[in-house]
Image (cartoon, rainbow, N blue to C red):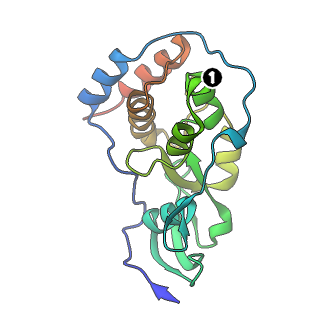
Amino acid sequence: MSTLLANPAGATPPAIPSKATAQSNLNALTVAAESGSGYNRDLFPHWITISGACNTRETVLRRDGSGVTVDSACYPTSGSWYSPYDGATWTNPADVDIDHVVPLAEAWRSGANTWTTSRRQSFANDLSGPQLIAVTDNVNQAKGDQDPSTWQPSRTAYRCTYAKMWIRTKYNWGLKLQSSEKSALQTMLNTCAS
């Protein structure tokens, strides 16, 4: 068993923009109706090997957890994870999902249906932006492939951050958004202090 450096509880994904940058990114996004039938999760190869025995899921569990230790296969054997969506803390990694902030099916309908499999794999395993976060499993499952016009974190205090993460991800990847989605994101962004 190897011990990894403990991160603060509630560690967050990288590259979450400021309110001003998120507003600029939101203004730059193309508003269009969703399109693209034929979605299949297998079209987005995910949980690829990142380093040694660690795949993307395990890498995010290590990043977002506190006091995380892993075995030789990189599976967490201890630690805790705070889910900013609902405020719950978990000590069993099986209770934690890695959420694609912009769901894969949503990305597909927003332009990823025209991407290569390689680009979709990069999107599904994006550790450089705020696209992946450890959250309560049943909260993630309830979110499904919904956008912010129909699903937002139950913790209203996190909605500003969630909107900034969603906007940055769509901006970074050149994805479109619907008008109802843009309105919901603007409302959420308006709650941000900075």
Q: Is residue 146 visible?
A: no
Work out which quarter of the rendered image holds the C terminus and state it: top left
What amino acid is found at the position of numbered circle 1 in the picture? Arg
Relative image position of residue 38 (x, y in whole percent): 75, 25
Residue extending furthest toward the bottom: 1
74 with respect to 27 (left or right): right
Q: Residue at x 40, y 54 (%)?
A: 12
Q: Name the residue rendered at 49%, 60% in the picture.
A: 60
User: From this viewpoint, is residue 128 visible?
Assistant: yes
Q: Is residue 72 above or below residue 15?
A: below
Instruction: Measuring from the top left, give residue 158's x and y in whole percent.
Output: 44, 42
**Residue drawn where x is 68% and y is 39% of the image:** 43
For residue 84, side relative to residue 71 (left or right): left
Tell me the element at label 1. Answer: helix
Q: Position of residue 64 (x, y in %)?
A: 45, 62
Residue 173, x across and y down, in percent: 43, 31
